[in-house]
Amino acid sequence: MIKIKYENVVKQFPGSDHLAVDNLNMEVHEGEICILVGPSGCGKTTSMKMTNRIFEHTSGHIYIDGVDNRDINPIELRLGIGYVIQEIGLFPHMTIADNVATVLVEKKWPKNKIHQRVEEMLNLVGLDPEIYSKRRPSGLSGGQRQRVGVARALASDPPVMLMDEPFGAVDPITRARLQNEFLRLQEQMKKTIIFVTHDIDEAIKMGDRIAVMRYGQLVQYATPDDLLSMPANDFVSSLVGGNRSIKRLNLIKVEDIDLYRPPEVAEGDSKTKVVEAVAGDKLGVALVVDDRGKLVGTVTNTDLKRKGEYVKDIYAPAHDLVGPKSTLRDTLSIMLGYGEGYALAVDQEGKPRGAVSVDDIFSAVKDNE
Ligand SMILES: Nc1ncnc2c1ncn2[C@@H]1O[C@H](COP(=O)(O)OP(=O)(O)OP(=O)(O)O)[C@@H](O)[C@H]1O
Ligand SMILES: [Mg+2]
């Protein structure tokens, strides 16, 4: 199903001698993430803003569910499309709760329903409403503000979302976490999303399809796999970069590969039990789980030298874990930072899923070629 269709779309700003968008033809499939990627000024934001008529296109047509967007009342149109703007754009004088509620207020939702929905949205993006609802944007970190921007766009549950560099202003680790959380949400939401980035790694990780733009033109529109294996021209090749095997690591997620499972021990187990477990494991590690089955740490030979009768006295706390949506590229950087030949993976609840080793990464890339 085609959700959004661009047909010969042109945008020339008044007084400008060039086309900001030059004959864009593109179809966005329902329930997919379409990534717009390309150098600064190539027309990504302009293409988005024409979709919900913040900008009017000079010529051509944009269809949403087969209806020309010029035939839709612009206010109605905007209320039906979630929009995360570049630079987040929260209202500085309003609380976080009021920021998230903006579209709901415009839609005239009853007060109690708004309150409930705002709490639900803040929880969804991992911000405790108790702590954050009453704060102003200035009291939040960059990554937290980006979460608020995403919560606001999702609040009225629009079927279409436009997201302009939604994770642009954060460090790589927070960014990877936001990406993973968003992909997990999208698995349930199945929204049609146009997502702008200028980070090719993010594009490959997040996109069902990638639109590469340059000078207002669509240069290539393909799946991440096809973009890597069949770049349309030198420009796309250079954008994708030299080492395609490394890029391909962005394409494979932890949930896509079979994982080796080291032995598990409980915090209350005796040291003797864990000595056996570690000795018998090929990676020389035992995973420590708490009474709810969550991974809390590991024991290796180094930890066994510590004094203590029980596992809980000697284990090393778990850190730098990867999740189902982490890419093998994220996993590899964690391994390198960690100085181990493997990284530990947990599921959504924090329960151990297994270990990803360097060998697993090599063979996953090989299988994919
Ligand atoms: N309101 C405007 N008035 C006039 N020209 C504009 C306006 N907005 C954008 N442009 C021009 O249109 C072209 C495309 O801009 P656009 O903002 O779409 O780029 P972009 O791909 O989003 O870039 P970036 O990655 O820097 O956000 C640029 O040449 C820009 O200068
Ligand atoms: Mg832009």
Image (spheres, grey):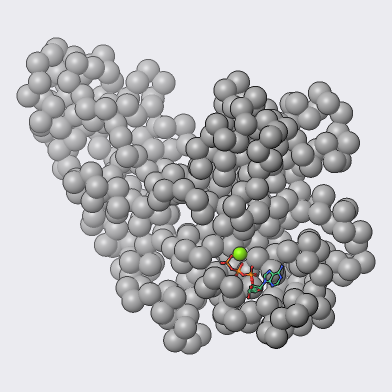
What is the x, y in percent for residue 328?
36, 55
Give the residue drawn at x 41%, y 48%.
171
Quick one: 7 or 314, which is closer to the camera?
A: 7
Q: Is residue 26 left or right of residue 37?
A: right
Query: Which picture quadrant has residue 321?
Result: top left
Give the residue drawn at x 65%, y 54%.
85
Quick one: quadrant of the C terminus?
Answer: bottom left
The answer to whether residue 289 shows anywhere in this view is: yes
Give the residue drawn at x 47%, y 63%.
199
Give the residue drawn at x 13%, y 27%.
303
Quick one: 206 or 353, which is closer to the camera?
A: 206
What is the x, y in percent for residue 273?
16, 21
* Residue that extends furthest to the left in the rendered view of this protein: 305
Q: In this view, does 144 lie to the left or right of 194?
A: left
Q: Is residue 109 left or right of residue 312?
A: right
Q: In this view, does 270 lie above or below 77?
A: above
* Residue that extends furthest to the front in the rendered view of this protein: 15
Query: Which picture quadrant has residue 16?
Result: bottom right
Quick one: 131 or 256, which is closer to the camera?
A: 131
Query: Which picture quadrant has residue 197?
Result: bottom right
Quick one: quadrant of the N terminus?
Answer: bottom right
What is the x, y in percent for residue 114?
78, 30
Determine the quadrant in which ligand 2 lies: bottom right
Q: How many numbered circles are shown? A: 0
What is the x, y in percent for residue 277?
17, 29
